[in-house]
Image (spheres, helix red, strand yellow):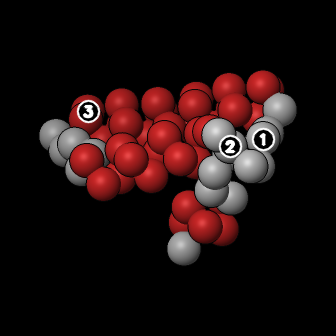
Amino acid sequence: MNDHPIPDEERAQRQRAIDFARISTELSGGSLSRDMEALNVRFVSGELSMSDYMG
């Protein structure tokens, strides 16, 4: 259960940003690590704030 729910629009905006970063990385020949993907899930769900995610 998420103790820090975020509005649906915020969740969608976060997902779009993550998708863009993933595509950009893949087009450059890279890939996101499993650890980074796990952080992405936590960020999109609202479990992590932007400062937690970036820090």
Residue 40 rendering spot, x and y as whole percentages: 47, 45
Question: In whole angstroms, how far apart are the C-alphas of marks 3 and 2?
Answer: 33 Å
Crowding near pointer 3: few (<14 within 10 Å), some, many (20+)? few
x and y, in percent, of residue 13 in the image: 69, 32
In-image side of 38 versus 30 (left or right):
right
Question: Circle 2 — which element?
Answer: loop
Image location of residue 7, percent across then percent down: 83, 32
Mark with earlier residue (1, 3) = 1
Pick the front one: 29 or 48: 48
For residue 43, side relative to residue 32 (left or right): right
Q: Is residue 14 shown above or below 54?
A: above
* Identity of the residue drawn at 64% across and 51% down: 47
| Quarter assignment of residue 17 | top right
Give the number of the disc on residue 27: 3
> Residue 34: image x %, image y %?
25, 47
Mark 2 residue type: Asn
* In the rendered image, the vertical position of residue 2 relative to residue 27, given as above or below: below
Element assignment for label 3: helix
Label 2 sits on residue: 2
- Residue drawn where x is 79% and y is 39% of the image: 6
Residue 31 image-quadrant placement: top left
Residue at the bottom extreme?
Answer: 55
Give the Cα distance between marks 1 and 3: 32 Å
How crowded pointer 2 is (Cα within 10 Å; few <14, some 14-19, many 20+) is rated as few
